[in-house]
Image: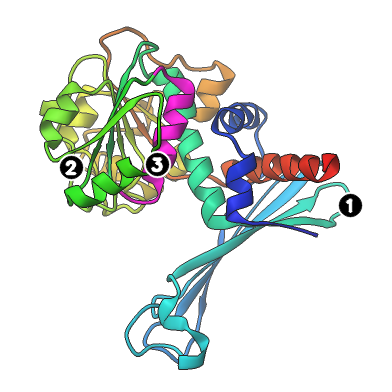
Amino acid sequence: MRTVTGAELRSVLHHRMLIERLRQTFRAGVEAPAAHRHTVQTYGQHDGTLLLEPAWQINQCIGIKVVTDFPDNGAPGSGAPESGANDLPAVQGVYLLIDGKTGMPQAVLDNAALTKRRTAAASALAASYLARPDSERLLIVGTGALAPELVEAYAAVLHIKQVLVWGRHIDKARKVVGRFHRPKFRIEATDDLEGAVGGAHVIVCATSAKEPLIRGDWLQPGQHLDLVGGMTPDAREADDACVRKARVFVDTRDGACKQAGDIVQPMRAGLLTEDDIAGDLYDLTRGERAGRRFYDQITLFKSVGTPLEDLSAAQLAVEMVLHNDTIR
């Protein structure tokens, strides 16, 4: 069974290639039963969590995301000293890919790298339907590990010429900018969020914000707003005015309407109904719903992730790794 490290995965899983594979997989669909979540008792202050997310395509491949969340990792004085628990992140995981014809395990992949790359690719896939084709100015709101991935993914589907990165701490935004060497676009850090929003063609938020960062009053005709963070019902990245002004799309209706605060909270307040959601990635990739209808329309895309994306990305990564192994 092949092990695919994060570095190896990043080297073979190119954004443009992955975006097209996701497009094909959303068109075809996969089987994805509900995730399994279990509490794991520990001797620490907090119990751990084990998450299992399966998905498969009949007679092709089976994938299982295995993620643990142990909150005491990294806490002062937690864990056995010899285990090095204080140096470990709370959330860790792997992705297991299995042959769908024989049931034989094929590969174990680094889950963190896989998740970052497929998340950015899903946003770029949505933008290929929802952003103006002539979009050149990209704003990234957030300075986490996803920020560089999102820049690269968007540059694969749009002719990006200028990128601004905003974070609560300007030094962190500058670190994101510093990761790009000789890019084909101009990239800078900014501390003026409102001004950056007003001047962008595409605004991408990937934060852990609990309160809205983006105000609908700041939005301009023709913009595309992509909300990647806010993965729980109590988290928000954009205010209600953004929802009112935009044509709203999601990655999956079931996930967004249950998990995403930027969708759940407006629905609870009666500002948005499920029928008001113009479409999801299944609709867009299958041509069942139109994306951007006119030049000045404001579009909003909210993602929470789906096992389909993990399975699609893992399958492509293993194909590319095995191909490289063969030609060496």
Residue 206 visible in image: no
Tag in front: 2 or 3: 3
Residue at x-position 28% and y-position 42%: 262
Residue at x-position 41% and y-position 89%: 44
Q: Earlier in the sequence, mark 1 or mark 2?
A: 1
Q: Which residue is mark 3?
A: 148
- For this orientation, the residue located farthest to the right is 102
- Marks 1/3 in contact by CB < 8 Å: the verdict is no
Q: How would you classify the magenta stretch by its main secondary structure?
A: helix
Q: Which mark is residue 102?
A: 1
Q: Is residue 244 magenta?
A: no
- Marks 2/3 in contact by CB < 8 Å: the verdict is no
Judge from the rendering whether residue 252 lies leftward or rightward of residue 278; answer left or right: right
Whether 148 is drawn above or below 38: the answer is: above
Residue 163's spot in the image, x, y percent? 29, 29
Residue at x-position 39% and y-position 51%: 145
Residue 65's spot in the image, x, y percent? 61, 57
Q: Nearer the viewer, residue 278 or 219?
A: 219
**Label 1 crowd bin: few (<14), some (14–19), many (20+), radius 10 Å:** few
Q: For the residues marked 1 and 3, what is the alpha-carbon distance in whole angstroms?
A: 38 Å
The residue tagged with tag 3: helix, strand or loop? Answer: helix
Residue 43's spot in the image, x, y percent? 46, 92
Q: Which mark is residue 213?
A: 2
Q: Looking at the figure, which quarter contains the N terminus?
A: bottom right
Q: Which mark is residue 286?
A: none
Q: Is residue 158 magenta?
A: yes
Whether 222 is drawn above or below 50: the answer is: above
Q: Which residues are magenta?
A: 143-159
The amino acid pointed to by label 2 is Leu
The amino acid pointed to by label 3 is Pro
